[in-house]
Amino acid sequence: MTDPAVREEPAPGAEARGEWRTALALLLVILGTSVVGPGILAGLPFIALVAVLPVPRKRALLLAAAIAFLVFGARSEDSMWYFERGWGVLLSGWFLGITLRWPAWSLTSRALGAVGGAAAVAAAVFAARPGMWSAVDWQVKDRLTMGVQQALTLLEQAREEALPSALETSVLRTAEVQGTLFPAFLGLASLAGLGVAWWGYRRIAAGQMPGLGRLREFRFNDQLVWLLIGGLASLMVGAEGVERAGSNAVVFMGALYALRGAAVVLFLNGGITFFGAVIVLMGLLFVAPILLAGALLVGVSDTWLDVRNRVRESES
């Protein structure tokens, strides 16, 4: 999700295929982590970019109009309907504003700035109207619980027998944890959505490449380590609201640092083969905590070691 600074230039066709795979992976992140869909997290920022920035390919305007119809066409009185679209508008406005003001910033920096700005505005609104936050929080948890219960019911029907009670309890507990951590997951999904939106603008509207950088160059501002440290410190306070804020900060930054650690490993290895990808996927199935902890440690260490720049300096 960063602007690339690469050691070797790939063939144009390979780069295009790689960007398609990256965009698909980002869409899967949205679908797998957030209760807010890609139509809002990726579609609304795409509409904002197409509406303000130059659009050499006019067919992108039709795509933007279709997305707007899908997102706003069926109105609901549900408070989640307003929250989802309100968040999407805030995210889009901040991303567009930062892109116009600081166009030289990397995609990751602009996306993180947009998520941070949207979160600050949303927090101010919820602080002014606490009842609104309670309603949204309850509906998110209710939506997650209902989704899990429906999935368990379908599984029972397919098996034609009751599921073990321990499995049901574990799955419902997972949904409860995801509900508690949904702000962190929403932040991560929003970053993915902005990546898809920027890729869509560059590739579909502007006909330019690249829109997304390569994973092995992923990095972000080193000062964000203090958000991780602050989150860890908040977990020791014990107050419910502070502890929840700290746990969300730890999950959000932990995921980013794990991704940064994976980027460092890919950089040192010069990439990853198909066989290597299969091995990593198998490892995530069986020893995911170990792999994620290792990637997190490498990512946090890179804040001070800056491994990739040191390697480039030694090579030059």
Image: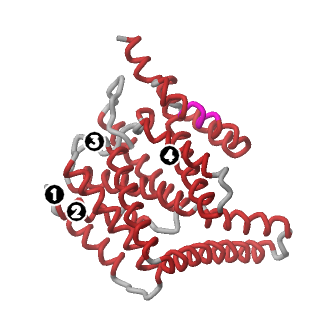
Q: Which residue is mark 4?
A: 227
Going by the numbered disc 4, the residue's amino acid type is: Leu
Q: Earlier in the sequence, mark 3 or mark 4?
A: 3
The residues bearing labels 3 and 4 have C-alpha atoms spaced at a distance of 21 Å
The residues bearing labels 2 and 3 have C-alpha atoms spaced at a distance of 24 Å
| Spot occupied by residue 270 in the image (x, y as percentages of width and height) | 47, 24
Q: Is residue 270 magenta?
A: no
Foreground residue among 78 and 195: 78
The secondary element bearing badge 1 is classed as: loop
Q: Which residue is mark 2?
A: 60
How would you rate the neighbour count of disc 3 (Cα within 10 Å): few for under 14, some for 14-19, many for 20 or more? some
Q: Which residue is mark 1?
A: 55
The residues bearing labels 2 and 1 have C-alpha atoms spaced at a distance of 7 Å
The secondary element bearing badge 4 is classed as: helix
Report the magenta stretch's main SS.
Answer: helix
| Spot occupied by residue 287 in the image (x, y as percentages of width and height) | 72, 41
Please report contact status of discs 2 and 1: CB closer than 8 Å, yes or no: yes
